[in-house]
Image: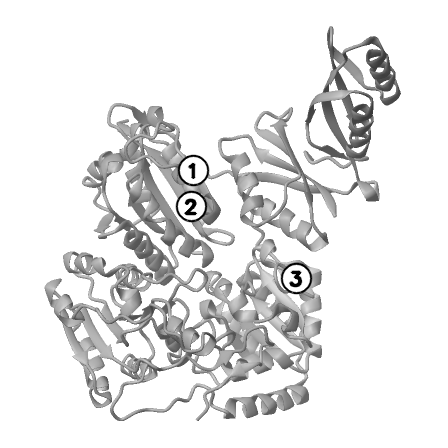
Amino acid sequence: MTLMSGAQMLVRTLEDLGVDHLFGYPGGAVLDIYDALLDSKKIHHVLGRHEQGVAHEADGYARATGRVGVCLVTSGPGATNTVTAIATAYMDSIPLVVITGQVGTPLIGSDAFQEVDTVGITRPIVKHSYLCQSPLDIPKYLRQAFYLAASGRPGPVVVDVPKDCVGPSRRFEYPEDQQVVMRSYNPNLLGHRGQIKRAAKLLSEAKHPVLMVGGGAVISKAADKVRKLAHDFNLPVTSTLMGLGVFPGTDRQFLGMLGMHGTYEANEAMDKADLVLALGVRFDDRVTNSVQKFCPAAKIVHVDIDPASISKTVNADLPIVGDVDTVLGQLLETIEEQGIVCDKDALEGWWKQIEQWRHLDCLRYKSDPQLIQPQDVIRSLYKATSGRAIIATDVGQHQMFVAQHYQFDEPRHLLTSGGLGTMGYGFPAAIGAKVGCPDETVCLVTGDGSFQMNIQELSCCLEFNIPVKIFLLDNHTLGMVRQWQRMFYRGRISSTSLNSNPDFVALAKAYGHEGFRVEKPGELDGAIRKALAMKDKLVIVDVVCNTDAMVLPMQQMRGSMGDMFLNED
Amino acid sequence: MRRVISILIENEAGSLSRVVGLFSQRGYNIESLTVAPTDDATLSRCTILTDGDKMEVEQITKQLHKLVCVYRVSALDEEAEGGLERELVLLKIATPNRNVRDEIKSLADIFAARIVDVNPEIYTLQFAGSSTEADNFVSTVCKSAEVMEVVRSGVLGIARGSHSMHN
């Protein structure tokens, strides 16, 4: 039996947990861990260029693969730089394990060099956190961290590792086959049978039902059962931003995304529904508009694994605590056992009504022969990738254009910061996704504002040959903020113009990548195909597009679901 | 509405800060807070007096339960005869003359308080009872003597009848 240092146990535990990629950035407090990493043949380390990027990369890896994303950073500023990324993962329930270095235990509390209270700073934005007190805590806490991050409602877990716990002088026997035992944590997967029977009954009685899916349906891998239920009952389906792809975007029964920039038909259907079957959603304010006016006629059946999400903002008439996929399995079984069918006549009428709303074609926009519209880019990218690419976005107008115009047919293909709305998320997320899914086409759709918030990761892509395709909707402005200034601040444009952008094409080349600029609508399709064809290259396509484009439709503030500003032409 | 929430938490570093942090983070109110280890040394019991309507208290208990370090949560409701509440009060009173000392002694008898420390010119009283009784006791003593210091433990709570958080 060879004895191992804390650092060696840390690396060994990660290997035993099946970690193949570790995103990280070294520093003083994690020198011993980096030394031990050199001896690992199973873990590939991806060196980011900023700890925020590193942690977003692990997040993108987790979202695209469904596995736990892991990152390693040093103490102090290394840890604080991950805070935005941890909060991003927390808001979107992403399984992330963040290993942070810490000063040695005798120094903790002494304001030592590169010391911060990492556990304290991250406390409100983690599912749980650990501060190791001895080397033997490392394997135990890491196993618990992985279990916590991935089970129940997933989320980020921080493991803070003081330097003296990983040093070479203290050696221990590695604890093999350690079981995770946590009496205070028992997520409930199975739905309550009585509640499920009631849900089946409501479904059979509904005249105007809507199925609403969210990120929880992605996490629980419920796409097959969502599709079966929707098709068996001919239900209209809408999705939150986080749920896109669970139900195919190209399916006739899909109404599009709901909420602030959702489609008119999805929001009207919610407004007039008599039953909303909500699966793995949390009724965020960007979805509900005014809670008081939300779905006035509907009984709400709310399925979620987190009891605290139920009746938090919108009161659930029928709450079901459980894993979406498990509960749907139970529901489908009950439906079959009891021979429950939908009200076919009522649904036929309901669909006629929905088709009228749909006829409005709320996502239409006016093309311009001289000026590229941002929507053109998404539609062209959709065609060129046959709708199959993994798309990461940043935050702003381009994010909403992707949600509206790229029809996702599979889950885990849209990587976007839904809850926190983190500019700078998209590029590192795309990197993580490409590392986790090297055979997939991974594209970043970003804006000239967002891209510059983590642009340094271009260097990481060159070093590790990570050929993501970057479509930069370059409108020389912070488009979404500008849109609000135009709509709600009497057109007073305050600090949203970006007139000193770098030459992104030259920048791509400076970092050793490819890049080209597109300015004419006629050149767009060709440029996108050209970029996608350069398989082994990171390419920046700098698409100069309309500064004044607006994301429409848009819900009117404090209104009901159906109160929307529509495209006027 | 005033509510007493009892929480069993893992007796480990950081547990209490997670509980307290949750209250400030989500804008819930803490009127009083007590915490101490239980007979099971791996668990601490925390009693929080808060206020909020039914939905708020339900959300508070759900959010508390979601904390990984929280083992059990229970909202006591004394108005429905669901729980017993007690507070401990220590009062330091100036007793410059015999009249005041006699008065304090008789008030202590009436309220079943104990005089736990005696100096020539200072008495310290100990009182245990419900929050309302504690309020009455303090305000009554205030009328009869100069109160130098008041310390209240905050509310402790336990369910009536057979219900136990440890089962």
> How many other residues sit within 10 Å of disc 3, few (<14), some (14-19) or many (≥20)?
many
Q: Which mark is residue A157?
A: 2
Q: Is any atom of residue A524 visible in this view?
A: yes
Q: Amino acid at mark 1?
A: Tyr
Q: Position of residue B18 (x, y in %)?
A: 52, 40
Q: Residue at x 60, y 90 (%)?
A: A353
Quarter of the image where the C terminus of chain B is located: top right
Residue under pointer 1 = A130
Residue under pointer 3 = A319
Q: Residue at x 85, y 12 (%)?
A: B99
Q: Is residue A559 above or below residue A34?
A: below
Say which element carries label 3: strand
- Badge 2 or badge 3: first in the primary sequence: 2
Whether label 1 touches label 2, CB < 8 Å: yes
- Badge 1 or badge 2: first in the primary sequence: 1
> How many other residues sit within 10 Å of disc 1, few (<14), some (14-19) or many (≥20)?
many
Disc 1 to disc 2, C-alpha distance: 8 Å
Residue A323 falls in image quadrant = bottom right
Say which element carries label 2: strand
> What chain is tagged by disc 3?
A
Q: Amino acid at mark 2?
A: Val
Q: Is any atom of residue A337 visible in this view?
A: no
Q: Is residue A552 above or below residue A436?
A: below
Residue A541 falls in image quadrant = bottom left
Q: Amino acid at mark 3?
A: Pro
Q: Position of residue B93 (x, y in %)?
A: 74, 17
Image position of A296 (left or right of A2): right
Disc 2 to disc 3, C-alpha distance: 28 Å
Image position of A460 (left or right of A142): left
